[in-house]
Amino acid sequence: MDFYPNESHSSGFKQESAPWTIFDFISFLILSQNKLLGSLPTALFRSSQLFTLALSHNNFFGELSENIGDAKLLSFLMLDKNSFFGPIPQSISQISSLELLDLSRNRLFGNIFPVFYHQVNLLYADFSSNQFLGEVPTTFPPDIETLALGGNKFSGALPSNLTKLRNLQRLKLQDNNISGQIPIEFVNILTRMIEAPPNPTSRTSSFAAAIAFSSSTIFLTSKTSGFAVAKAFSSKIFSTEFAINELIVNWKKSKQGLSSHIIDMYFLLDLLNNQLSSEIPTSLSTLKALKMLNLSFNKLFGKIPTSLGDLQNVERLDLSHNKLSSPIPIDFTKLQQLTTLDVSNNKLTGRIPIGGQMNTML
């Protein structure tokens, strides 16, 4: 059965009439991009077989059930683009099999994040476009690769204990109220960004396969065949291309998803639209794998570090709407991958460097 997408105007889950015993046999429940509404029943998370739950882009509402942590085999949870509100249930941090968590574009709030156990396999977490506040949370598993916290109300300084996130590749903190300096030590937080991007064809992952489920079908598998179906399906998916809409890159009012074949080589740091006030640390130049660096709409001052010309893989560099006051470094002519450079609305002086990719921008 395929419910993605259609024009259903269903009232969604009804506690009083649905045969909830069916959840004991569901491994994959994909209802994305419909017009379903209602709250989620607690019985949904008592399933001993639930592996993938994708309810993105519907009209579901209400608080998330505290027993969400009972779904011990849940690996992919996508509840984005709904109207859920309230805090994130603490029990979600107990799902050790969880790899992908997308709660973005809801009305969730609170200043206490779940403390994820180290043994949780979480690789991708998106909490963007909600109403969370307080300091930037750091209570995530050390192996997380993508962390999206933009579009909330986080404040305070960039936390130094992000250093424990040793495999972080994509960090999005745009559109918050983060203030203070960009710490020199910040480069140590992003150790995976220092080396050149890996070969995207060198490995496959169940994470990438799960993204494809969000544009596929609903699976009602038996207790005995659930994982067999999952593995067989994921092995077929890798021969095709599909769009990853869960990670949205915002650039110049344009929004686009990253395709599956480049997700493992796309490293980004997005601090757009905060209250950062310091010079740009020269240490950022050691992040050789960065594809996108966005520091725009802050209060950064001083010179543009010439060492940013060492960002050999950067394609998009945005330093606009700050208080920078220097010439554009001639070293930018070394940026052979650069396609978009924005340094507008600063106090820059001098001539535009000539040579390399800079010639394409004149």
Image (spheres, grey):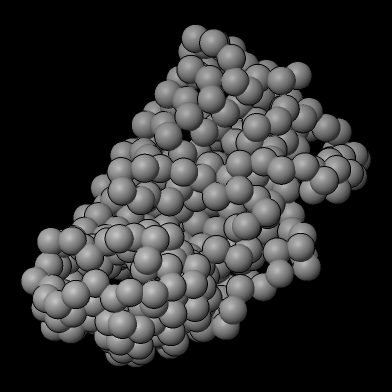
| Image location of residue 315, percent across then percent down | 45, 64
In the rendered view, does 275 fall on the left or right side of 28?
A: left
Near-viewer residue (13 or 193): 193
Number of residue marks: 0
Q: Report whether 256 appears left or right of 342.
A: right
Query: Which residue is pictured at 70% across the width and 30% down the height?
Result: 216
Dividing the picture into quadrants, the one containing residue 39 is top left
Q: Residue at x 59, y 20 (%)?
A: 5
Residue 23 percent across, percent down from the top left:
70, 30
Q: Is residue 166 above or below residue 156?
A: below
Report the front residue among 288 and 163: 288
- The image quarter containing residue 22 is top right
* Quadrant, the N terminus: top right
Residue 359 against residue 308 in the figure, above or below: above
| Residue 189 spot, x, y in % from top left | 43, 82
157 lies left or right of 18:
left
Q: Quadrant of the C terminus?
A: bottom left
**Which residue sits at x=31%, y=48%?**
252
Let me know if residue 141 appears in the view: no
Residue 4 in view: yes
Indicate the quadrant where residue 120 lies: bottom right
Q: Position of residue 101 (x, y in %)?
A: 54, 51
State the residue at coordinates (67%, 58%).
97
Asked if 76 appears above or below 167 in the picture, the reply is above
For residue 138, side relative to residue 95 (left or right): left
Q: Between 321 and 184, which is closer to the camera in this rendering? A: 321
- Closer-to-camera residue (5/39): 5
